[in-house]
């Protein structure tokens, strides 16, 4: 079936309409992940966990890790999205995540961790929530690793 000029114009119009939505979703995710990293870097475990749905696999183990990590250590983190797929309601992303863990006692040494983390997000009540995070061991306090 040949493609008409009308079909081509319609497809171009639909792509032009979708492009801002994709860009907006990407920026929302960048902002969301920035807030997530900032919460952890500020020692705000509750702020970090509030962005993760409690139905996430191993949520309670992650909660224990984050609580211990923020109680025992100072954390700085940075992350970059390396892969993103999805739409305005659900996203699957891969993030290059770097953690620097500074023990609160002066005698300990700084531990640097870097790992690719797979994250699934869903929009719930107009806000993004993490519904899957793997691996969670990246966030284990040094005393557990």
Image: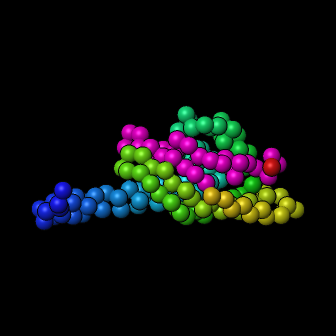
Q: Is residue 93 magenta?
A: no
Q: Can you say whether 88 is above or below 30 in the image?
A: above
Residue 70 visible in the displayed image: no
**Residue visible at 78% across and 62% down?**
111
Q: Quadrant of residue 109?
A: bottom right
Q: Quadrant of the N terminus?
A: bottom left
Extreme residue in the front direction: 1
**Residue visible at 17% across and 60% down?**
2
**Residue visible at 38% across and 45% down?**
89
Q: Is residue 128 left or right of residue 75?
A: left
Q: Position of residue 19 (x, y in %)?
A: 30, 62
Q: Position of residue 10 (x, y in %)?
A: 16, 60
Q: Nearer the viewer, residue 56 or 75?
A: 56
Q: Is residue 100 left or right of residue 122?
A: right
Q: Is residue 128 magenta?
A: yes
Q: Position of residue 73 (x, y in %)?
A: 75, 55
Residue 121 visible in the displayed image: yes
Coloration of the structure image: rainbow
For the record, the magenta segment spans 117-144
**Residue visible at 48% across and 54% down?**
32
Q: Position of residue 45 (x, y in %)?
A: 63, 47
Q: Is residue 28 left or right of residue 112?
A: left
């Amino acid at each position: 079936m040949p493609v008409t000029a009308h079909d081509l114009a319609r497809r171009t119009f639909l792509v032009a309409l979708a492009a801002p939505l994709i860009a907006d979703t990407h920026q929302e995710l960048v902002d969301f992940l920035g807030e997530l990293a900032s919460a952890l870097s500020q020692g705000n475990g509750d702020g970090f966990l509030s962005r993760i749905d409690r139905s996430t696999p191993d949520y309670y183990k992650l909660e224990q890790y984050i609580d211990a990590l923020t109680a025992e250590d100072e954390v700085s983190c940075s992350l970059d999205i390396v892969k993103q797929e999805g739409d305005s309601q659900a996203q699957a992303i891969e993030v290059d995540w770097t953690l620097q863990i500074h023990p609160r006692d002066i005698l300990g040494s700084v531990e640097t961790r870097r790992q690719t983390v797979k994250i699934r997000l869903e929009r719930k009540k107009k806000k993004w929530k993490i519904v899957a995070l793997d691996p969670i061991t990246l966030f284990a306090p040094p005393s557990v690793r």
